[in-house]
Image (spheres, coloured by chain):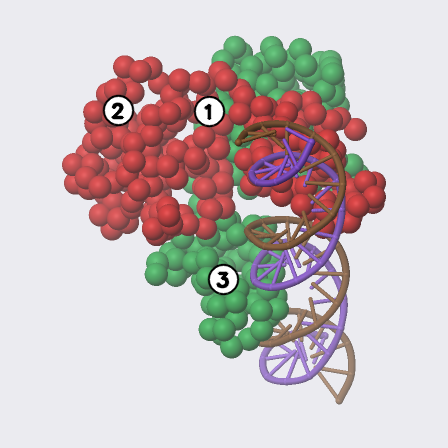
Chain colours: A red, B green, C purple, D brown
Amino acid sequence: MSELRRVRLYVTVGQRLLRDSLLFQILLHDDVELVGESETGVDTLNRLNLARPGVLLIEENLRDNDGLTIAESALSVHPSLSVLLISDTPVSSARMAIYLEAGIKAVVSKDQPIQELIKTLFYIRNGQVYVGNWQQPPASAPAALEAYQGLSGREREVAQLMARRVPVREIAGQLGVSCKTVHSYKDRIFVKLGFERLPELILFMQRHHHGAAA
Amino acid sequence: MSELRRVRLYVTVGQRLLRDSLLFQILLHDDVELVGESETGVDTLNRLNLARPGVLLIEENLRDNDGLTIAESALSVHPSLSVLLISDTPVSSARMAIYLEAGIKAVVSKDQPIQELIKTLFYIRNGQVYVGNWQQPPASAPAALEAYQGLSGREREVAQLMARRVPVREIAGQLGVSCKTVHSYKDRIFVKLGFERLPELILFMQRHHHGAAA
DNA sequence: CATCATTTGTAGGAATTTCCTACACGATTC
DNA sequence: GAATCGTGTAGGAAATTCCTACAAATGATG
């Protein structure tokens, strides 16, 4: 239902390190197409006509300008563009109001986990506004933590072993079940925790001290 | 030969967004073990004894302190620690000298691609100093571009199709070869270009306008 | 209390990916 | 002329991803 077509994404992020790592995460999803990227605001505006993105992911603080100004210019020419602003700090509701007023679809702060950004990106892809996430920056990982409580015994065992990068083979051996069964647990763990890739699980398990120590 | 043991990594990066995305990239490598992370310098120093990392990845500019100071404190207690500093801007040779003097093993700037950081991380893991990368921040991607010239005809065809996310099935069909052959090309492309995952190829192809446009 | 729904432990299939090896053929080199 | 290298081709093993299946336990409900 949300698979209308690929998202045409333009990314404006000043620092290469952040831009690259965001892009690597985002491009893991095969319904995103990168149509352009810039380090500065003017460069973005110059290239927008050719790139014709559906979504613009832009930093608030750019070398040459601020993201809000650039976004407003872009929106005046391409009103259908969905803009996702990346702010350096958590946004107050007052600032959020300004952003929404300007036609920006959503804001994520750099203090939020990357999954939040990705989730928001996919949420606004079809033009929706997303205001669900500007209030809980200090809430570390309540959703996933709660979800962890919901894992069954077997699932936790597998989660711990996987997070220590024990190969499926050995997990199966240790638990005395087939590899297929281990995969089933793995699938269910990922579904329950809302993860998609092993690094997410490793990071989660390590952060919450769930057996990451040998 | 370099597989002595897993790298025990501690990461000190203020912003969650950057920290998470770096970690997701780094944890793709199964010989890295995250033993701790902090947002601030003092927190890092407090936890270092328990975490016992072999490598400390730390930002230069932290909320409470500067990375250099923290690194020096850490090194005075744990002289065998390999410190990799992430600087906000390209480092001058003068500053590089200061860092080396302080016992820091390598510096990468936020203007460099993330692969550079990863490469450096693996380079310094066993205590080596790495000074090869502080001079060419504006040199975009000469290595990979050169490497691209080295691709054979078939390899380029496959690279272009893969970058457009054409499924292996279809690529095989279009080229009239077996899926296995396509995989072989893929393997060779990745080896030649030094990539490890599809997003790297997609990003590269897109950036250099090699057939990314439909 | 008996039945219906959900969760949990178990497993298999199909398509893909990753990593590695193999091999023939043409070109280069010594 | 013989050894080597790059290229096009392909296969195998293990892992991953995405689905489906099913029986036993658990829980909920009429």
Residue type indicated by callout 1: Gln
Q: Is residue B149 visible?
A: no
Q: CA distance from mark 3 to mark 2?
A: 39 Å
Going by the image, does A56 lie left or right of B197?
A: left
Residue B120 drawn at (x, y percent): 61, 37
Depth check, front residue: C27 or B179:
B179
Residue located beneath label 2 in the image: A99
Q: Label 3 near label 1: C-beta < 8 Å?
A: no
Q: Give the residue type at disc 2.
A: Tyr
Q: Is residue A67 above or below residue B213?
A: above
Secondary structure type for disc 3:
loop
Evaluate if marks 3 and 2 touch, with contact meaning CB atoms under 8 Å apart.
no
Q: Residue at x 42, y 50 (%)?
A: A31
x and y, in percent, of residue A192 in the image = 58, 35
Residue highlighted by disc 3? B167
Which chain contains the residue that carries disc 1? A
* Quadrant location of the C terminus of chain B in the rendered image: bottom left
Q: CA distance from mark 1 to mark 3?
A: 33 Å
The kind of residue tagged 3 is Pro
Classify mark 1: helix, strand or loop. Answer: loop
Instruction: Name the secondary structure under disc 2.
Output: helix
Q: Nearer the viewer, residue B127 or A201?
A: A201
| Quarter of image, res B24 | top right
Judge whether A179 appears above or below D4 on screen.
above
From the top left corner, tell me how far across and down residue D10 is, in percent: 65, 75
Q: Is residue C23 above or below residue B123?
A: below
Residue at image point 49% right, 62% down? B167
B82 versus B190 height, above or below? above
Q: Which mark is residue A112?
A: 1
- Left-right relation of A163 to A191: right
Number of other residues with Cα within 10 Å of mark 2, as a class: few under 14, some 14 to 19, many 20 or more: many
